[in-house]
Image (cartoon, grey):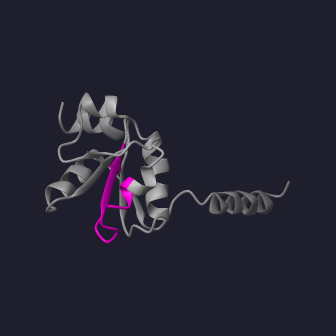
Amino acid sequence: MKPGFILVVLVTLLSCSGFYHDNIALVSPGEFELQIANLENPQIVDVRTQAEFNKGAIPGAVNIDLNDDKFKQKVEVLDKYKPVYVYCRAGLRSKDASKLIADYGFEKVYELVGGYVNWKKNINP
């Protein structure tokens, strides 16, 4: 197979995945903390289960379980024109949630890399 053909196939596959939007940004725990600290009433969404949320959460976060049948309805009460900060336990559910939130028309979504585990390890040990 020609190297050029492989490159074209890879670019096509990656561009068709459609996972990330222009309005989703991955941020480190430090950047996440800095941004939410500089906002009045930041919109922080914890997409873990209620049981996980009850064991500890980022201050100011609201719990909207990604697996809740009313996830979309609960998210859509947020302001679409203000940034939304999303996290889960380790970063897997927040990827799905960030894409959904962006699909719902939110202008800017910040996804915490490594989730609550990474935030707790780096910001609030």
User: In screen coordinates, is 30 left or right of 81?
Assistant: left
Which residue is at 20% across, 55% downward?
36
- Locate the C terminus by quadrant: top left
Residue 9 percent location from the top left of the image: 75, 59
User: In screen coordinates, is 96 left or right of 48?
Assistant: right
Image quarter for residue 14? bottom right
Establish if 55 lies above or below 28: above
Image quarter for residue 25? bottom left
For the residue pair 32 and 57, the one nearer the viewer reads as: 57
Establish if 76 lies above or below 93: below
Which residue is at 38% across, 70% downward?
107
Q: Is residue 85 magenta?
A: yes
Which residue is at 20% across, 50% downward?
33
User: In screen coordinates, is 64 left or right of 124?
Assistant: right
Residue 86 percent location from the top left of the image: 35, 50
Residue 88 percent location from the top left of the image: 37, 40
User: In screen coordinates, is 95 left or right of 50?
Assistant: right
Residue 58 percent location from the top left of the image: 22, 41
Q: Is residue 13 magenta?
A: no
Establish if 13 lies above or below 46: below
For the residue pair 114 and 73, the one nearer the viewer reads as: 73
How many marks can you see? 0
- Locate the N terminus by quadrant: bottom right
Establish if 51 lies above or below 29: above
Residue lying farthest to the right in this orientation: 1
Q: Which residues are magenta?
A: 74-87
